Amino acid sequence: MLKRITLHNFMSHSHTVIDLSPGLTVLTGPNNCGKSAFVSALQILAENTTGDFMVRHGEKECRVIVETDDGHTIEWKRKKKTVSYNIDGVDYHRLRNSVPDQLHEILKLSKVKAGDTDEFDVHFGEQKSPIFLLGDRGSRAARFFASSSDASVLIEMQKLHRSKVKSAQQEYQRQQKELKSTEIVLELLKPVPEMETRLESLNLSYEALLKEQQRIRDLEAFLQDYQHADQRVLQLSGTVATLNKLPGSLEQENEKPLEVLTQRYEAFENKTRVAQFQVSTLQPLANPPPLEKTERLEKLIREIRTQELELRSASATGDCLNLLKEPPSLAETDPLQKLIQKIAVSEERTQLDRLESEVLEACVPPPELTDLERIEQLCQQWEQAAVQFNHQQVIHAECESEYEAVRDQLQNWVKENPSCPTCGAALEPDQFIRTAETGLKGHAHGA
């Protein structure tokens, strides 16, 4: 219950304080003495009426202060075009045409809502208008009395249930489309593990061939040494044969160098036999295949891994967004929501098509390998991907045209309706379209 009202520079009051009685308070006096100003002050405090007509002539600001019997203090202040509230010491600014949420809980002077559009002011009446509902149409009075029954609650619950079911169906369709696109990407990425395994086996074969080539070079060097040693042995054998023809009475030279030379000759013979065996073993082997450049394949693998990381990040972002609570219910905007959702789906398709086109443009034909069946399979897969890419380009063009048409419709609608049908605030076409495109919080109403 209100206990005290203070007006400061409000209409004809420079500074007036009235202590209200616990029961009924009656204001009496001659005309134009400021009685109606108190009723207007309470109405402006409860509804945050626009305009500066209430500021006293010659003053820069006005204030309305209300104190309740349960200890709350509410102050409303207008200074030029700025309005602010102070509730129990807490300031509220930039309210535009709305009021703080806890204001109606404290004052209990809010309007009674009937349906989505009708509002009935049961606390304040116009000075020169008939009593409440007597000057309104019969249908409006009927809606007011129907709002107090349980039927209106059931209707509201039914509308809320329909909107939730519709949102769930739209979300299900969006997830189905996203699942199909993800399956297509996974199908395109299936050959990658097999290609990696094949590349690893080729690397191992290449390393083994390098080792064999080194061994062959070592054996060739060994054969050259063996041939030189064989020639040297022949020379020494001739020398020994010549020396054996000499008479036995001659002085014999030291035989140790010849013995050492014979041992070396026998060792060379053993090495020669081993080398011949190795050469005979390696001769049937075919020459190693020429190595191809793998830079393009490595680039493709890096791009695929980058796409996997982006896909995981997008999935994590989707999981986080799924945990968010539903936004508060707004006015009936189903047609606009459908258009916005179509635009969002078109943008997602466009981004997916652009990403697939970049991947496909960067791809090059694989190098020629011995196994041609695998190459033919890869070529068929790339051809299928190209067909899908062309199909997605057609869909992208249709989405772009549909997006431009929807954008023109939204701009025309905002031009035809320059103010919000719910709160009356001005709507700017550029800001309205930018909010619909980016999904950022734009024009909104209080809960």
Image: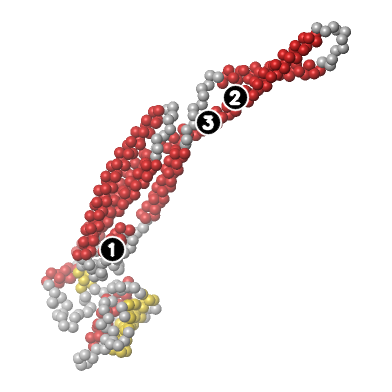
Instruction: Give the residue type at disc 3.
Output: Tyr
**Considering only order in the chain, which callout, 1 or 3, is on the residue closer to the N terminus?**
3
The quadrant holding residue 165 is: bottom left
282 vs 444: above or below: above
Which residue bears the numbered disc 3? 206
Instruction: Give the residue type at disc 2.
Output: Ile
Which residue ends up furthest to the left in the rendered image?
A: 138
Q: In the image, what residue occupies the spot 26% across and 64% down?
A: 429
Q: Residues within 10 Å of mark 2 (few under 14, many from 20)?
A: some
Between 416 and 83, the residue placed more toward the observer is 416
Determine whether the residue tagged by mark 2 lies in a helix, strand or loop: helix
Which residue bears the numbered disc 1? 430
The mark closer to the camera, 3 or 2, is 2
Q: Percent x, y for residue 174?
A: 30, 50
Decide if residue 265 is in sight here.
no
Which residue bears the numbered disc 2? 216
Instruction: Return the mark for residue 370.
Output: none
**Considering only order in the chain, which callout, 2 or 3, is on the residue closer to the N terminus?**
3
Q: In the image, what residue occupies the spot 49% across and 34% down?
A: 200
Instruction: Give the residue type at disc 1.
Output: Asp
Instruction: Give the CA distance from mark 3 to mark 2.
Output: 15 Å
Determine whether the residue tagged by mark 1 lies in a helix, strand or loop: helix
Q: Percent x, y for residue 4?
A: 32, 85
Q: Residues within 10 Å of mark 3 (few under 14, many from 20)?
A: some
Query: 403 left or right of 307?
Result: left
127 vs 442: above or below: below
**Considering only order in the chain, which callout, 1 or 2, is on the residue closer to the N terminus?**
2
From the image, which quarter does the C terminus lie in?
A: bottom left
Determine whether the residue tagged by mark 3 lies in a helix, strand or loop: helix
Query: 254 left or right of 340?
Result: right
Q: In the image, what residue occupies the spot 40% across and 47% down?
A: 311
